[in-house]
């Protein structure tokens, strides 16, 4: 049976507790698709000595947190579930946030891993103790120690707030897209949205219908492609659920089709012109007003930033109660936004859809490695570098899910996550099997890996497409995206390669 957490004197439930740290073999931090997937994998492999520390009160990660109106996935539903727990009940071709969150919760229930979670447990710091050969974690539910720490905290979880003068003085309602305040009724209000990324283009059409007036502040016009979203017919739903192999076939077809995009994105950016033509035709069709059309026409190669899909964003911008503002924001006053041309637009509520700290996550400052430096300090020096997206030199016995250069813009992150689950689960298994207590990726192995990676990234559209994006860090390196086919990453992470690691002892 699974170990229960309901032990009254261990501090886990915020009950009695004391100063004694609770020791666990493996601690997983975060329970989104990645952390939850690893918990299930470890349970399936027969491991019992692990815990998942989750700061929220539920599993789901980004899908639990991003409850903004219109939240939906831009990866087709059939590809957006774990391979070991295919969802045969999707109701539409592109799923909406609540349906994905229900799926994640159902998987947690099905595999009975909730009891391995400590919810409401925010890890405030994690420090490698080299003398004792273990991780020491401070959390809001007391101290823990672990032989192995797996950071599955997600790349898109720490809201990035814009550094705009006076933003703190704003007197109305203000919230970030990932922290939507559902107590605020925007109906009939004057609202501003800052940002025109993946989140904003889903929010804008939803709230435009109910607000009195909406100002959308755009810094860079994004490329938009059609969203082929529809409800499945009853026959399709029946086939996905009951016809053997039908879900799997659909999944493989979508996977293969999406993988072809890598050729344009990562190998021959000139090929992206074809997609640009499609996006331009859509733009011409959906935006009839020439002034608005010129404002929303992007000035970089498609694919350089994440390609967005929407059928209702451009029409929303064309509404009488919506203005697209392209002048830079100068400052925010208690009751409005002032642009560089001196115009003040009064508002009652401000929605900040400016994305996340990806290459500069504040979480990095709380993880201290072998030599006492934090992950933030190490990354500040050399950029966000890792080995196979899963390990970082100077951080023994630490693994990272959705770590450096594992991101994708064209297909499902769950595929990459499952590749990493193979690698990390095999690492834990290998350590047990061989009796090796400490593993730390060799600096040379990491350096060679990154040199090869950056060489591959050099000619990609993300580097050559003429845009500034969060894919690039402050050194100008792309430390977020995987530059190849995803099956190449799968092959590379199939087994843990102990020989790339130091095994001090
Ligand atoms: P994002 O893609 O980083 O977009 C942020 C937007 O805010 C951009 O338009 C950016 O302009 C703008 N911005 C940032 N700082 C600003 C400032 N100081 N002043 C004015 N504008 C500013 O963030 P996101 O839309 O939240 O999406 C993040 C990622 O989450 C996506 O790339 C995607 O991976 C994921 N996501 C996926 C979905 C989906 O599946 N449908 C939905 C939402 C999010 P610039 O372009 O000029 O930087």
Image: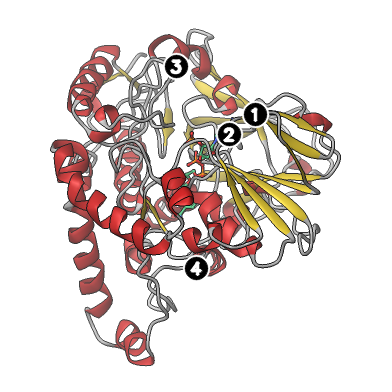
Q: Residue at x 35, y 65 (%)?
A: 76
Instruction: Tell me the tag on residue 327.
Output: 2
Q: Is residue 242 above or below residue 313?
A: below
Instruction: Tell me the tag on residue 103.
Output: 4
Between disc 1 and disc 4, the foreground one is 1
For residue 331, say whether it is visible: yes
- Find out whether the residues at labels 1 and 2 contact each other: C-beta distance under 8 Å: yes
Between disc 1 and disc 4, whose residue precedes?
4
Between disc 3 and disc 2, whose residue precedes?
2
Q: Position of residue 160 (x, y in %)?
A: 60, 33
Q: Is residue 394 above or below residue 320?
A: above
Structural crowding at the residue carrying mark 1, measured as other residues with C-alpha within 10 Å and reported as few (<14), some (14–19) or many (≥20): few
Distance from Cα at disc 1 to Cα at disc 3: 38 Å
- Find out whether the residues at labels 1 and 4 contact each other: C-beta distance under 8 Å: no
Left of 112 or right of it: where is 398? left
Q: For mark 1, what is the residue?
A: 341
Q: For mark 3, what is the residue?
A: 379
């Amino acid at each position: 049976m699974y170990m229960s957490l309901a032990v009254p004197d261990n501090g886990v439930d915020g009950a009695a507790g004391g100063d004694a740290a609770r020791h666990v073999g493996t601690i997983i931090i975060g329970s989104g698709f990645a952390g939850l997937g690893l918990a299930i994998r470890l349970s399936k492999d027969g491991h019992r000595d692990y815990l998942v520390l989750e700061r929220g009160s539920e599993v789901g990660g980004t899908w639990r947190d991003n409850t903004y109106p219109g939240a939906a996935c831009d990866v087709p539903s059939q590809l957006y579930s774990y391979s070991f727990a295919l969802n045969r009940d999707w109701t539409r071709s592109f799923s909406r946030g609540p349906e994905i969150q229900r799926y994640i919760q159902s998987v947690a229930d099905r595999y009975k891993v909730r009891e391995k979670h400590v919810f409401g447990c925010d890890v405030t710091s994690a420090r490698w103790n080299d003398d004792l050969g273990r991780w020491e974690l401070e959390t809001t539910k007391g101290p823990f120690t672990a032989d192995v720490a797996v950071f599955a905290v997600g790349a898109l979880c720490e809201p990035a707030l814009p550094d705009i003068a006076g933003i703190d003085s704003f007197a109305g309602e203000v919230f970030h897209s990932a922290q939507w305040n559902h107590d605020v009724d925007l109906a009939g209000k004057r609202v501003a949205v800052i940002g025109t990324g993946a989140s904003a283009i889903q929010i804008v059409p939803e709230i435009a219908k109910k607000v009195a007036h909406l100002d959308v502040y755009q810094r860079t016009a994004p490329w938009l492609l059609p969203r082929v979203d529809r409800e499945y017919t009853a026959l399709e739903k029946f086939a996905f659920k009951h016809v053997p192999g039908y879900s799997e076939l659909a999944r493989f077809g979508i996977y293969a089709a999406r993988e072809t995009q890598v050729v344009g994105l990562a190998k021959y950016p000139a090929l992206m012109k074809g997609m640009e033509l499609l996006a331009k035709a859509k733009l011409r069709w959906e935006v009839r007003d020439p002034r608005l059309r010129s404002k929303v026409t992007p000035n970089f190669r498609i694919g350089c930033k994440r390609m967005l899909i929407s059928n209702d964003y451009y029409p929303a911008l064309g509404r009488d109660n919506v203005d697209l503002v392209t002048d830079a924001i100068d400052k925010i006053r208690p009751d409005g936004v002032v642009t560089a041309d001196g115009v003040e637009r009064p508002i009652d509520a401000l929605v900040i859809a400016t994305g996340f700290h990806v290459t500069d996550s504040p979480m990095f400052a709380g993880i201290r490695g072998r030599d006492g430096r934090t992950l933030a300090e190490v990354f500040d020096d050399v950029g966000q570098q890792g080995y196979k997206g899963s390990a970082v030199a100077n951080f023994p016995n630490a693994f990272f899910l959705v770590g450096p250069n594992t991101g994708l813009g064209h297909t499902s992150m769950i595929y990459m996550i499952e590749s990493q689950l193979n690698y990390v689960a095999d690492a834990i298994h290998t350590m047990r099997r061989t009796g090796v207590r400490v593993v730390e990726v060799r600096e040379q192995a990491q350096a060679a890996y990154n040199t090869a990676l950056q060489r591959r990234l050099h000619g990609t559209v993300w580097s050559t497409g003429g845009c500034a994006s969060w894919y690039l860090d402050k050194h100008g390196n792309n430390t977020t995206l995987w530059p190849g086919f995803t099956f190449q990453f799968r092959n590379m992470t199939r087994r843990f390669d102990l020989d790339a690691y130091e095994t001090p002892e």
